[in-house]
Image (cartoon, helix red, strand yellow):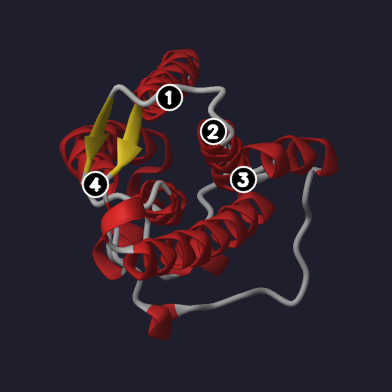
Amino acid sequence: MKKMAAYQQLRIYLTRIFFGLLIVLLLISGGRFETESPIFCAVLFLGGCVLAGIASLGRLWCSLYIAGHKTKDLVVTGPYSICRNPLYFFSMLGGIGVGLATETVTIPIIIAVTFMLYYPYVIRFEEEKLRTVHSEQYEGYFKTTPQFWPRWSLLTEPEDYIVNPKLFKRHMFSALWFIWLIGILEVIEALREAGIMKTYFSIY
């Protein structure tokens, strides 16, 4: 369990570093669509906000079910009844949403490709740990529930559920990262329009 916790912490750090590098890229670059197609920019930004909103709500939903249960119980209800990795599914939506909110197509493509290359390894590692801890119970769950893409017809939710409020409160802040990142993007754009920040090159 300690090894898994350390691995998850490393994954969180790597994700933050990745988004930090993207922000640096955005600090020194501008979007070509801003001048070439303002309407397309607006569509990209709106789509990004919608995906980021869905992702934040989805991550909160997941956090509600794993707060106080993640390390000791196999959670198979709520979002975990529609797929085995709903937290990563909603994270992918949020990452692509933030990418679209940059009003470019390059950034969301970078995020999507990075996710597809990196997270399958993360998922396989965590599933092996769950298989070791929960053995037969996990095998049954593995066979009946999709790994990543949700199957909404499988949704089951209990009438009552016990949640650790302190852990849930901590998860709430991490679930809102996508909204905060879009806010940062808007600040960067405002500084650039005010002439305070310089654009060194443009991307589509």
Give the image location of residue 19, x and y in percent.
41, 28
Give the image location of residue 136, x and y in percent.
34, 51
Q: Tags 4 and 3 in contact by the CB under 8 Å rule?
A: no
The residue located at (35%, 61%) in the rendering is 141
Nearer the observer, disc 2 or disc 4?
Answer: 2
The residue located at (44%, 48%) in the rendering is 98
- Lower position in the chain sequence, tag 2 or tag 4: 4
179 or 31: nearer the viewer: 31
Left or right: residue 98 compared with residue 70: left
95 or 27: nearer the viewer: 27
39 or 18: nearer the viewer: 39
Q: Label 3 is placed on what type of residue?
A: Ala
Label 2, residues with CA under 10 Å away: few <14, some 14-19, many ≥20: some
- Lower position in the chain sequence, tag 2 or tag 3: 3
**Between marks 1 and 3, how big is the CA–CA gap?**
24 Å
**Residue corresponding to mark 1:** 27
Q: Tags 1 and 2 in contact by the CB under 8 Å rule?
A: yes
Q: Which mark is residue 188?
A: 2
Left or right: residue 120 compared with residue 96: left
Label 4, residues with CA under 10 Å away: few <14, some 14-19, many ≥20: some
Nearer the observer, disc 4 or disc 1?
Answer: 1
**Residue corresponding to mark 4:** 112
Q: Tags 1 and 3 in contact by the CB under 8 Å rule?
A: no
Secondary structure under tag 2 reads helix
Give the image location of residue 107, x and y in percent.
28, 42
Q: In this rendering, does residue 139 appear at all?
A: no
Secondary structure under tag 4 reads helix
Secondary structure under tag 1 reads helix
**Between marks 4 and 3, how big is the CA–CA gap?**
19 Å
**Between marks 4 and 1, how big is the CA–CA gap?**
20 Å
**Residue corresponding to mark 3:** 175
Q: Which of the 4 image quadrants contains residue 200?
A: top left
